[in-house]
Image (cartoon, rainbow, N blue to C red):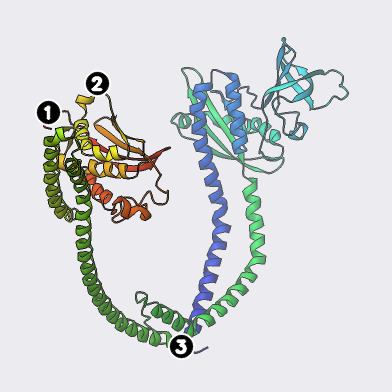
Amino acid sequence: MKRRGVALKLFVVTSVLILLVFTILLLAQGLFFEQFYRMSKINVLEKSMNKFARQYKEAQSSERQVSRLLGAFMNEHDTSTDILNSRFERISTHPYYLELEAGSKTITIQISKEGMTVDQIPQKIQIGETLVVDGIFMNEDDTIMHPVVIQQTDTVLKEGLVRVRGKVTDLMLPERRSYNPLYQDALVDDVLLDWNSQMEQWQSRLRSGSVLQLDWQDKWSGIPYTVLIRLLSEGNEENSYLFVMTSMQPVGEAVGILKQYVVYLAPLMVLLAIVLSLIYSRIVSRPLVLLSRSAARLAKLDFTEQSAIDSKDEFGELSRSMVALSRNLDASMKELTHANAMLQEDVEEKRRSEQLRKELIANISHELKTPLGIVKGFAEGLQDGVASDKSERYLALIVNETDRMNALIMDMLELSKFEAKAIQLQPRSLALASLIQRVSDAFSQQLEMKQLQLRINADKEEEEELLVRADPRRLEQVILNFMSNAIRHAVVNSAITIGIQRTAPGKITTVIENIGPPIPEEDISRVWDHFYRAERSRDRKSGGTGLGLAITKHILELHGSEYGVENTKQGVAFSFTLDENGGTTYD
């Protein structure tokens, strides 16, 4: 290693930091872990005692509910818990019990804190299980028993005891508690006896709502305990207190074992820190590592992570050279990117202009096809002498269709402005059913040629009320397109159905359905695209150019309409919505 090289610096600094962190961690564990554990446990117990006090106020009228609260608290926190009266004497409670149904009687088996250990109670007792209990009845009704033997099978009954066999209907037993919890619970009397003379001076502090925290040690086993006492309920004559005692032996044993573990662990950690620091410093000191990473970023045209290293070693010189190279390449790439973006914008603008021109020509061609077909049909009828008595009506229809073609040409010239939001609608209130009927009359000859029936379904009682607000000329163009498509793709001798109904408050929905071949599922979402045609093989025969639905889409979007298409059981249905208008009709 060089005297001023980065490898030596990294080795020294890394070794010192690892050893310093390890030393601080060991000292913290040895000095503060026991105190931290004690504070955390006491804090949890104080919060649980406050919760217990609130629950006790609701359940103190029921001895059974109080017993269950005590048992659940002791199991959850592995504590010995009792309720004391105003003289700091234990109130008789039995937090652990079994309730058996024996014949017509319900017998309560009270698990005493004296004379029985946990290993004398069968494990994993379940409600509904049958137990055999030998003991002594504690009341005249023989419903409360002090147990001596609790078992799941019959054995020889000892002299002087009474046997009860029944199904478990309710229970509360010691769970998740330390070894011999019943012995610990019995120590509460010893604690109260040792502190009997000091209890009165603590009453004022307890009545203020404070939690009294005391330490006590079992003279027989030497195990230290922490005792917490708080006011549980306050009455005119009698106060009650919650007494909680928890063992601090586990943390003491853990700290002792941890100190012994550190003695063996410290030399290994020192050796490991030195070895890892040496390996790390040698790896980082290799200049090719940084050079390779910087070159890889430059190859990907990434110039954002070229950080400078202010040092006099090899890394500093290499960093300065790479930063200069990165800045020069970044400036050159920005200039090229800007020039390329300008070129792309010019190309895109020319392509868009050409596309708009083609769409305009195609749209005009498509929209003129349908009215020209209608005019031709009536003209041929006059030429052949068909319906000669209606010649005036035919001539009037030809004039109307000629006017409509002229209006459509002007509309298609404006259609190219749709994308720029330059088209302004002229909405007004109109009767939708009347408009559809009038537009459908223009297709009478095409309907007769394919032997098609036209059915307009609208509620007769509400027909006069189904008024919509729309631009009549644009809406007529929409219906013409939908009708033209429906007739073109309908099978001969079938029906075209137009349904008009109120589907939601303020919304009128129109559905135009024919009977014919369905649209392929993969194409159904593309029917609204410009120049798209689902039946490409019939384009020349049917006269469709694929622009009608694209034009209809723009008009409906300007009306704020919800439109769609779906395949039905017999054909295809197109639908669109319009806003209802309750005003006067100007149609």
The one nearer the camera, 446 or 45, is 446
Dot 1 or dot 2: first in sequence order is 2
Residue type at mark 1: give it.
Thr
Instruction: Say which residue appears at 43% left-offset and 88% top-offset.
Output: 314
**Secondary structure of the residue carrying numbered label 1:** loop
Circle 1 residue: 584
Left or right: 69 as drawn, with respect to 329: right
Residue 265 place in picture, x, y as percent:
65, 66
**Secondary structure of the residue carrying numbered label 3:** loop
Q: How crowded is mark 1: few (under 14 residues within 10 Å), some or many (20 or more)?
A: few
Instruction: Say which residue appears at 34% left-offset and 81% top-offset.
Output: 326
Dot 2 or dot 3: first in sequence order is 3
Q: Label 1 to label 3, Cα distance in Å?
A: 95 Å
Q: Which residue is situated farthest in the top direction here? A: 140
Q: Is residue 483 above or below residue 22?
A: above
Dot 1 or dot 3: first in sequence order is 3
Circle 2 residue: 461
Q: In which quarter of the image is the C terminus?
A: top left
The residue mark sitting in front, 1 or 3, is 1
Residue 42 place in picture, x, y as percent:
53, 42
Q: Label 2 to label 3, Cα distance in Å?
A: 100 Å
Residue type at mark 2: give it.
Glu
Q: In this view, does 530 lie above or below 327?
A: above
Residue type at mark 3: give it.
Arg
Q: Label 1 to label 2, Cα distance in Å?
A: 18 Å
Circle 3 residue: 4
The disc placed on residue 345 is none
Q: How crowded is mark 2: few (under 14 residues within 10 Å), some or many (20 or more)?
A: few
Residue 517 visible here: yes
The one nearer the camera, 317 or 466, is 466
Q: Are marks 1 and 2 in contact (CB under 8 Å)?
A: no
